Amino acid sequence: MEKLQYISQGNTIQEQELHIRNALDNGIKWVQVRWKNAPENELINLCEISKQLCSEYQSVCIINDHVQLAKEIDADGVHLGLNDSSIEKARLILGENKIIGGTANTLSDVIQRIEESCNYIGLGPLRFTTTKEKLSPVLGFEGYQEIVNGLRDQSIDIPKIFAIGSVALEDLLPLQEIGIYGVAVSGQITKQPSVINEFKKVMI
């Protein structure tokens, strides 16, 4: 599983597609299509375009929230928030071979996600981010460390955890030292797609 995921950004389908293309051109191998409050027909269109582009670039394409849409376009999987449809239901719809990621904010969320057999957990936010309207409490590095320690204390294997929420290049080493598997980045890659190569060098 790739360690760097790009979460798409943009207020229009044109912006979204441009940013996804830029990320792919700069070597991203995993795109999460995320466009909150999008008109339904445009979202479907964007997801179809993204799946096609990712196939051409041999990259993974997952869809935020929309399980049925992910199935219809044969995306590689979905990412589900804590208040979205259940992992169990998504697994029934998508089958065993698709990627299902789940959001978490606390130790109990992480344990819940492990029990639900997520393929990876998006844990955060690391710090304040403007890309999310209803932001969960900010964790900071200390929060990640406490959660990882909490798992170890209960002899639970550390799952594939991705840090989310305004993650920057300089955060990678401290996160890896804590035991975090990867990062999901939106803002920094949208603004400066060439940073993908820098991320990849650190995240071997």
Image: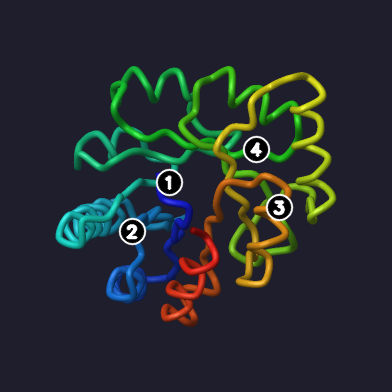
For label 4, the SS is strand
Q: Nearer the viewer, residue 157 or 66?
A: 157
Among the two numbered marks 1 and 4 on one chain, the one whose residue lies closer to the N terminus: 1
Of tags 1 and 4, which is closer to the observer? 4
Q: Name the residue that disc number 4 marks.
A: 104
Of tags 2 and 3, which is closer to the observer? 3
Q: Which label number is shown at residue 177?
A: 3
Work out how far the residue at label 4 is from the one at label 2, CA to CA, in angstroms: 23 Å
Q: Residue furthest front?
A: 204
Work out how far the residue at label 1 is from the one at label 3, CA to CA, in angstroms: 28 Å
Type of the residue with mark 1: Asn
For label 3, the SS is helix
Residue in the image at 79% along x and 55% along y: 141
Work out how far the residue at label 2 is from the one at label 3, CA to CA, in angstroms: 23 Å
Q: Residues within 10 Å of mark 4 (few under 14, many from 20)?
A: many
Q: Name the residue that disc number 2 marks.
A: 29
Of tags 1 and 3, which is closer to the observer? 3
In this figure, which colouring scheme has been used for the structure? rainbow
Q: Nearer the viewer, residue 154 or 69?
A: 154
Q: Name the residue that disc number 1 marks.
A: 64
Among the two numbered marks 1 and 3 on one chain, the one whose residue lies closer to the N terminus: 1
The part of the image, by quadrant, that contains residue 39 is: bottom left
Q: Residues within 10 Å of mark 1 (few under 14, many from 20)?
A: many
